[in-house]
Amino acid sequence: MKGIIAKTATPNAERKLYIETYGCAMNLADSEVVASILADKGFQTTNLIEQADVVFINTCSIRDNAESHVWGRLKEFKPHKRKNPKLIIGVLGCMAERLKNDLLEKEQIIDIVVGPDAYRDIPRLIEQVDEGGRAVNVLLSREETYAEITPVRLSSNGVTAFISIMRGCNNMCSFCVVPFTRGRERSRPSASVVQEAQNLYEAGYKEVTLLGQNVDSYNEQNEAGESICNFAGLLKKVAAIAPDLRVRFSSSHPKDITDEVLFAMQSHPNICKHIHFPIQSGNSRVLNLMNRTYDREWLIQRIQRIRELMPNCGISTDIIAGFCSETEVEHQETVSMMRDMQFNFAFMYAYSEREGTLAQRRYADDIPSEVKSRRLAEIISTQQKNSVQLNQNEIGQIHTVLAEGFSKRSDQDLRGRNEQNIIVIFPKENYQKGDYVRVKIESSSQTTLVGKAIEKIQQPNSN
């Protein structure tokens, strides 16, 4: 995701900023907050790094390959810095907070390092660099939610948008750096979330995705510390804005997906029937080492409950291959769970040790890289077979698709997603972006359904 920035407050002194965003949707949402903060100071945007006066790169620290990509990208910025010595280069987000010293020491081209709770300070930091020297703010906050900031939608399709409903995480999973880079959980007031969704709907958007490190633990409290709105309540409030506004959410922690949330999804046709359910492993001992607070049997029961209440619910997951001390038998338990539970799709990774985490302090990263790679390949192969079969089962079925734009391969086809978050391609004909279209599926691949449009409908639950 690329592009942004601006003018300084000084008249006729136009400056432009370019932002690259990598990783999860939360990072894109953060970049949109940064864009808004800078826009208030008169900043404009650019998609061309050659035009930029300020360059920001925003990424996460959850996995080593994400950080490696950033290090490589920073090296590619060096010719631009040589050509324009006044060019300001900064790193935003979790990686900035976690590796502030390394960033400043290893890459002399970096002028600004900003953590995820310090984006309001960016205009001051830019001024500080203008005056000479470098600028850093990676302080974490117990209150910051950027609740009143209306994000600038970057490269928006005008149909779908993200809304951050909370920040931080209280789950101390042993492999994860998020609690250390984004701080403790804090939830936005539900009124501000609903107002943002209302504004998007009035601007023509047809779908919003509620974002958080763990949305299911959303908990709005009053001044006395009493809970006044949980995630199920927030879901219902957003869904009530309009019947033709689709609502999605990400990401979840399995332990917090309550029956109340499932009932809210079940009772509101415009809440999409898709849950991201990151199991991480299918073995109880490994899950205990990961500090996931559930075991294999509990996971199976919870997935069965989701399908009992919503048989058509799409379920995706996250899997880590080769976690500390994982045996071959334990790995096979993960593979067997994937076969049995039939996830629609999965994000799959080999374990990479993250400095400062509980796992790094307590457990040896003792699975050889070649074993991790082999196990990951087996996990990927299993998921590919699941996805192919599940998508083949949809041939002949009719799905409601929100058209988000042209297919990547042809401007004669439209591309959208069904309720289960599966990509659907269909001929454009007389349909257009933003339409709800009933599509009969005629063929499929591992990741995509292809069909023929039947009719346009007014809202997700109309026939």
Image (cartoon, rainbow, N blue to C red):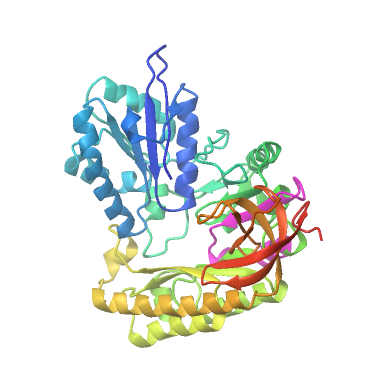
User: Residue 282, can we see it?
Assistant: no
The quarter of the displayed image where residue 344 is located? bottom right
Examine the image and state in which quarter residue 306 appears. bottom right
In depth, the one of 67 and 327 nearer the eye is 67
Q: Is residue 362 magenta?
A: no
Residue segment shown in magenta: 239-265
User: Who is closer to the viewer here, 213 or 440?
Assistant: 440
* Quadrant in the picture for the C terminus: bottom right
**From the viewer's perspective, is 124 left or right of 453?**
left
Residue 95 x, y percent position in the rendering: 33, 48
Q: Is residue 263 visible?
A: yes
Q: Which residue corresponds to the image point at 31% horizontal and 79% vertical from the top-left?
A: 374
Residue 86: percent from left, percent from top: 24, 25
Q: State whether residue 117 is above or below residue 294.
A: above
Q: Nearer the viewer, residue 222 or 338?
A: 338
Is residue 251 found inside the magenta-colored segment of the image? yes
Q: Report how many numbered discs are placed on residues in the image.
A: 0
Q: Is residue 134 left or right of residue 172?
A: left
Rendered image quadrant of residue 196: top right
